[in-house]
Amino acid sequence: MKKIILPVAAAAVLATGAYLGFKPSAEPAPSASSSRPAAGAPLVAVILPDSLSTNAQIGKRAFDATCAACHGVNGAGVEGSGPPLVHVIYEPSHHGDMAFVMAAQRGVQAHHWRFGDMPPQEGLTEGDLKAIVAYVREVQRANGIQ
């Protein structure tokens, strides 16, 4: 009987955490020697590709008009607003192209970062979204995210 109490207690703790929606943050904890960027500052340095495909050029215009306010110029993120899209978390093997499309169409519950939930983005066609994804992917590749 005593041998079963510990596994049952551990399962209860895990189930309670899952029920309450505990999800560890992928955002690194600040250390005593690091300081957070000022509100509105970019979160990562972004290297731009030498050139963009025609589809990515269209996507850049749509990104700048709709996404950059929260995700920053060129997807660098904005302290206090939204995460960088030029980040290993968003590599294609973890967040496929359709994940970006669905996030923009339906919104997404915060799960990797502490910026809060992303609301659905109104007024973007599926073509706009595919062009935005093409732009983000080309910038990611220029930054070694494949």
Image (cartoon, helix red, strand yellow):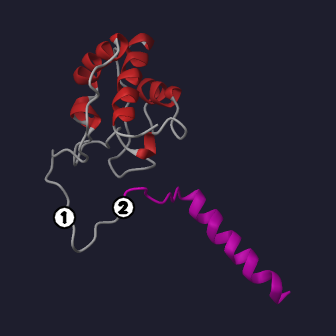
The residue pinned by badge 1 equals 35
Q: Residues within 10 Å of mark 1 (few under 14, many from 20)?
A: few
Q: Residues within 10 Å of mark 2 (few under 14, many from 20)?
A: few
The structure residue drawn at horizontal position 17% and vertical position 55%, both measured from the top left corner, is 37
The structure residue drawn at horizontal position 51% and vertical position 59%, both measured from the top left corner, is 22
The stretch of residues the image draws in magenta is: 1-28
The residue pinned by badge 2 equals 28
Residue contact at pointers 1 and 2, CB within 8 angstroms: no
Task: State how far apart marks 1 and 2 are (Cα).
Answer: 12 Å
The reply to whether residue 109 is visible in this rendering is no
Query: x%, y% of residue 29?
Result: 34, 65
- When asked about the image quadrant of residue 51, the answer is top left
Q: Main secondary structure of the magenta part?
A: helix
The reply to whether residue 32 is visible in this rendering is yes
Secondary structure state at the residue bearing disc 1 = loop
Answer with mark 1 or mark 2, whichever residue precedes in sequence: 2
**94 to the left or right of 105:** right
